Image: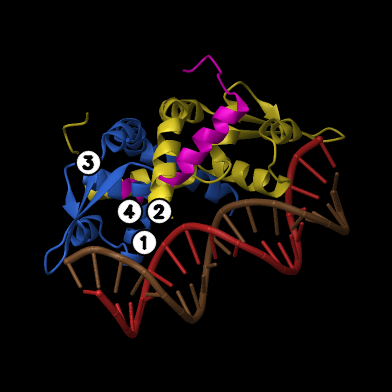
Chain colours: A blue, B yellow, C brown, D red
Amino acid sequence: MIPRHPHRTEDCRAVSEILQRVGDKWTVLVVGKLGDGPLRFNELRTAVGGISQKMLTTTLRGLERDGFVTRTVFPTIPPRVDYELTELGHELLVPVSALGEWARLNTQRVRAARARFDEVHA
Amino acid sequence: MIPRHPHRTEDCRAVSEILQRVGDKWTVLVVGKLGDGPLRFNELRTAVGGISQKMLTTTLRGLERDGFVTRTVFPTIPPRVDYELTELGHELLVPVSALGEWARLNTQRVRAARARFDEVHA
DNA sequence: CGGAATCCCTGACGATACTG
DNA sequence: CAGTATCGTCAGGGATTCCG
């Protein structure tokens, strides 16, 4: 249960920074979909579902900038652009998936706690 | 390298929800500090550093609502309020710490990728 | 098809002042 | 000490339109 506490402040900041990166509305969804292999822009759009193309573009740019995703343009008509996870992206997916699994397993407990709290603080 | 892909859309949403919860500016920092044991409001404030009391309150309320933290009021003068991680909070800290460790180990790679990207897209 | 540009709105966050 | 109340700022995000 993590008895040790290697919490140097600067490290916590780095952690927080990454978590905010990963914690925006769409990043994990996009990375998750790309985990199965490369996808084109609109494939990704429909795969994720509910994302505007502006936010998909923004999210992908951010992921590309941080080295998690590669962007490959095929100069055809009509144009074709593939997005694919890099090695770093795949590695990121490991702890993120673990957290994801935790979230999946504990959604009910959180929901229950939330319901109790809202009940009391009505 | 996560060859499997258990990415049911609803699960991804739950994951995304938790990550946004955990991905706000202060939550991980606060949970991290509480990982070492219970703390009073102002102890937490100075331990985290740079957080306004409004945001600390907000963050703690959110954590309490979701069942990650307990709030204990001692009816003394002056008042004393202790915050402590729940069992659920400690469990959350496990995958979060793993992600944190990943972040700590890979900060440089991300920074390098970012510098490269910014160089090209000057 | 895969964007870029624009407008707009909401909510996160910070600073300050006040209170039991 | 541990908040609450109020205000202001600013970035995240959505809808729409235009472009190569």
- Residue A34 spot, x, y in % from top left: 22, 46
Question: At which x and y percent is residue A47?
Answer: 20, 56
Q: Which mark is residue A55?
A: 1
Q: Residues within 10 Å of mark 4 (few under 14, many from 20)?
A: many
**Callout 1 and callout 3 share a chain:** yes
Camera-near label (4 vs 3) is 4
Q: Identify the magenta region.
A: A1-29
**Nearest the eye: B122 or B33:** B122
What type is the residue that disc 3 sits on? Answer: Gly
Tags 4 and 3 both on a single chain: yes
Dot 4 or dot 3, earlier in sequence:
3
Disc 1 is placed on an element classified as helix
Task: Say if mark 2 contacts mark 1, CB within 8 Å.
Answer: yes
Examine the rendered structure and indicate whether residue B22 appears above or below residue D19: above
Residue A19 in view in this figure: yes
Mark earlier in primary sequence (1, 3): 3
- Farthest left residue in view: A77
Between marks 4 and 2, how big is the CA–CA gap?
12 Å
Gap in angstroms between the C-alphas marked 2 and 3: 18 Å
Q: Chain of mark 1?
A: A
Q: In this figure, which residue is indicated by the disc labeled 2?
A: A25
Which of A100/B50 is in front?
A: B50
Residue, disc 4: A60
Label 3 element class: loop
| Amino acid type, label 4 | Leu
- For badge 2, the amino acid type reads Lys
Residue type (three-letter) at the residue carrying disc 1: Met
